[in-house]
Image (tube, rainbow, N blue to C red):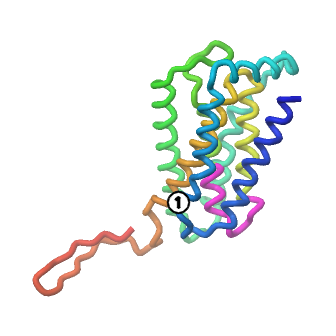
Amino acid sequence: MRRNKLLIVSAIYFLLYSLNLNCQSDSTSILKQTALPLTLMAKGVILNDQDIKTSIPDDIRSTFPNFDSRLDDYMMLGPTALDLAITLTDNIANNKKHLSDILIGELAMYITTKSLKKIIGSRRPNGGGQAFPSGHTSQAFNGATLLFHHYKNESFLLASSGYLLATATGALRVLNNRHWVSDVFFGAGLGILVGSLTYHLNPIGRMHDENRLGFQIGGNSMLLTWRF
């Protein structure tokens, strides 16, 4: 029962986040848009308490003692794969922005997650190492966040689909006994945070085909400019 409540609340939480983003313009303060991912990360830290985090997997394993699936290894790539497929096959004017977002986001996500895993060095529920945070979950939510930002104005259902895949990825990591719930919550928040920051701060492609080096000379001064 506790497992079902946890998964339902998590799914609703992430969907409400996507709805919240859809109502915000790109000019909305980045700080406001990072409120939820920071909350998820804080919740992950709180749930990382040894007594709290060990009780939930025990309940799950008693309900699904033989559960084993490799679907999460592929599902985590779903949002990014969908984003890439649409960008590469459709005639999108700002595909340079989309592709650079994906590349930068993936690189930043990989470096950040791997670094945290090595620094924290916590054990997995199945006895493995480098549990915190969940790399599968952070990867999935990073891709889902970029997908949402890229296509929320074209198709809300399409843009939101990445969050469903990401939520399912996080749930499977726990069901497979490969991560604590705390790992998944922190990974989800981290993925959303990196995805949002990448989208808003990446300058590549913002001016589409107007990227060029230029000079401005006036009076006694000369200015070198580079437009992205």
Viewer-side residue, 78 vs 139:
139
What residue appears at the point 57 percent right and 53 percent down from the top-left corner? 34
Q: Is residue 82 magenta?
A: no
**Camera-side residue of 154 and 121:** 121
Which residue is situated farthest in the top direction here?
A: 127
In the rendered view, tell whether residue 226 sits above or below residue 38: below
Residue 145 located within the stretch drawn in magenta: yes
Image coordinates of residue 60 in percent, x first then y, are 81, 22
Left or right for 53, reference 98: right
x, y percent for residue 148: 66, 58
Q: Residue furthest bottom?
A: 219
> Which residue is at 47% across, 71% downward?
208
The residue segment tinted magenta is 144-158
Residue under numbered circle 1: 30
Q: Amino acid at mark 1?
A: Ile
Which quadrant, please, contains the C terminus?
Answer: bottom left
